Amino acid sequence: MSPSASCGNDAPPTSNASMPTQQMPTSWFSNRRCGRGGPERREAGIDTRATNGMTYPDHPHRTIGDWTPVMLGDPFADLAGPIHRLSMDSAAEPVRFGMLVEDRHCNRLGFCHGGLLATFLDIALGVGAITVGHHDWGGPTIHLSIDYLQGAPKGDWIESRFTLEHGTRSLLFVTGAVVGGAGRIATCSALFKQPRPRPAG
């Protein structure tokens, strides 16, 4: 679901207010959720929503509907973004991530570069896993396997889907996908190191 369609907005907000650029704590995951939806489309068992000609706002930290920009404190992730998050009313999938495919994200064919999709999935699945586990910080990625199914063209709004399959004392096993206006773009399986308790002080 795109910001404009899922939240009943015909266009991104016009306010010049921006988000602070400090790292986002666990309070990212509030209980807010968009209550209205736009025209729904089903592709490969995953609900997606058309972008309806949405254009990205001129400020990278602007909120779009209930999608809130996140600053991960990771220079590479911040450079690859901007990435937004949406809190979900689901214990199994409490948060989704989304972003608009811009020209700088694309390869010479005009589709989102596979490396950008890998970065997006790494962030979405990693943060999703630690959220389900109620951790306030993440462990490193051990394994990331991606199957690319189709291209995401410039201007497409893409979103994450994830499932925490199971966890051990030291590892988290996660599967997920990226979806866009035409359905699944890529599927993924990942293995993350289970975060250890953060040292006091």
Image (cartoon, helix red, strand yellow):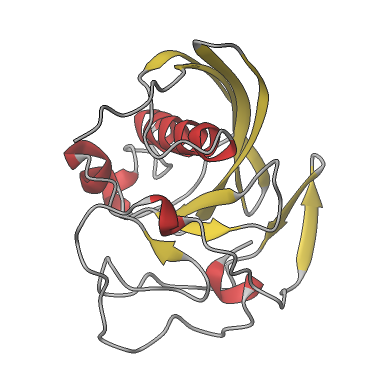
Residue ID at (51%, 76%): 65
User: 141 above or below 186?
Assistant: above
**How many marks are shown on the rendered structure?**
0
Image quarter hosting the N terminus: bottom right
> x%, y% of residue 52?
59, 73
Work out whether residue 63 or residue 92 is closer to the camera in this orientation and state it: 92
Compared across the picture, whether 36 is left or right of 158 comes to: right
Q: Dividing the picture into quarters, in which one does residue 5 lie?
A: bottom right
Question: In the depicted view, which residue is nearer to us: 115 or 145?
Answer: 145
Q: In this image, 127 relative to 149: left or right?
A: left
Residue drawn 53% across the image and 72% down it: 66
**Residue 115: quadrant of the picture:** top left
Q: Position of residue 180 (x, y in %)?
A: 60, 49
- Kindly tell me whether residue 88 is visible in this rendering: yes
Q: Residue 57: x and y, percent?
A: 34, 74
Q: Nearer the viewer, residue 96 or 106?
A: 96
Residue drawn at point x = 21 percent, y = 46 percent: 79
Report the quarter where the C terminus lies. Answer: top left
In the displayed orientation, state which residue is furthest to the front: 200
| Lateral position of residue 131 relative to residue 48, left or right | left
Taking 43 as reference, is 119 left or right?
A: left
Eyeballing the image, is 5 above or below 116? Answer: below
Rendered residue at 49%/83% (across/down): 11
Q: Is residue 71 above or below residue 147?
A: below
